[in-house]
Image (cartoon, rainbow, N blue to C red):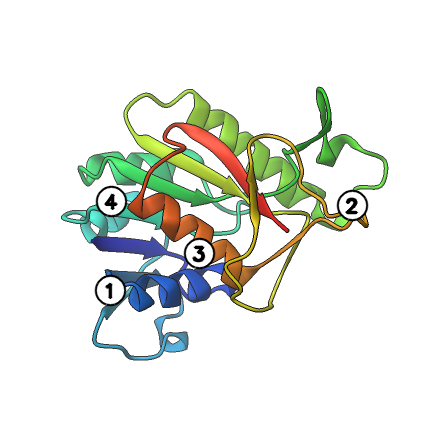
Amino acid sequence: MNVALIGASGNAGSRIRAELVRRGHRVTAIARHPERIAADDAVTVRAADASDGAALSGLLAGHDAVISALPFRGSDPETLIGAVKAAGVSRYLVVGGAGSLEVAPGVRLIDTPEFPDAYRTEAAAGAAFLERLRREDGLDWTFLSPSAMFVPGERTGRFRLGTDSLLADDTGTSSISFEDYAIALVDELETPRHVRRRFTVGY
């Protein structure tokens, strides 16, 4: 596929870029700091500010899918969704957050007393982005939430998928590496199973 990746130089974005290239996809890597992206024959690097919807839509046009790997704080869902739609791309995958996942029926992780205040603004913005997508009927969107600990690690290919509930292992730890997250996201790109839905990945 010909895939546009917004936020291609970040922690998640760089692993997703590598996974796309590993599987033979062509990538347009869009970043505010393109100098952070290593040259690759399968990657075309473009500088862009994601807050400029008109410029962004021009870069997205002609792709089979768009993946957004941007932090939610400072991102405008209307601008991003509008740019994808204006570009004429129907498939839109979003690197989500864990805060909107449920830890009990009707109780989100972000609503628990233990949720760190340092991450609350980002998590709330991610939850709002998901709710905006759920009202969107003009895109085949997917929102993939990581587990609570989203960290550098190994590419093992061994993980579990869920829907709206936080995944945790037998010790109560909820985690996923950037590398295994990238596998799950590109799997969904290649074989869509969660169109217009949120799902989650964890160990």
Q: Residues within 10 Å of mark 2 (few under 14, many from 20)?
A: few
Residue that appears at 19% across and 41% down: 87
Residue at which label 4 appears: 54
**Which mark identifies residue 24?**
1
Identify residue type, mark 1: Gly
Q: Secondary structure at mark 3?
A: helix
* Above or below, 169 relative to 130: below
Identify residue type, mark 2: Asp
Identify residue type, mark 3: Ile
Mark 1 → mark 2, Cα distance in angstroms:
40 Å
Q: Residues within 10 Å of mark 3 (few under 14, many from 20)?
A: many
Quadrant in which residue 120 is drawn: top right
Q: Earlier in the sequence, mark 4 or mark 1?
A: 1
Q: Residue 65: x percent and y percent?
A: 26, 45
Q: Earlier in the sequence, mark 3 or mark 4?
A: 4
**Which mark identifies residue 117?**
2
Q: Does the CB distance between marks 2 and 3 fall below 8 Å? A: no
Residue at which label 3 appears: 183
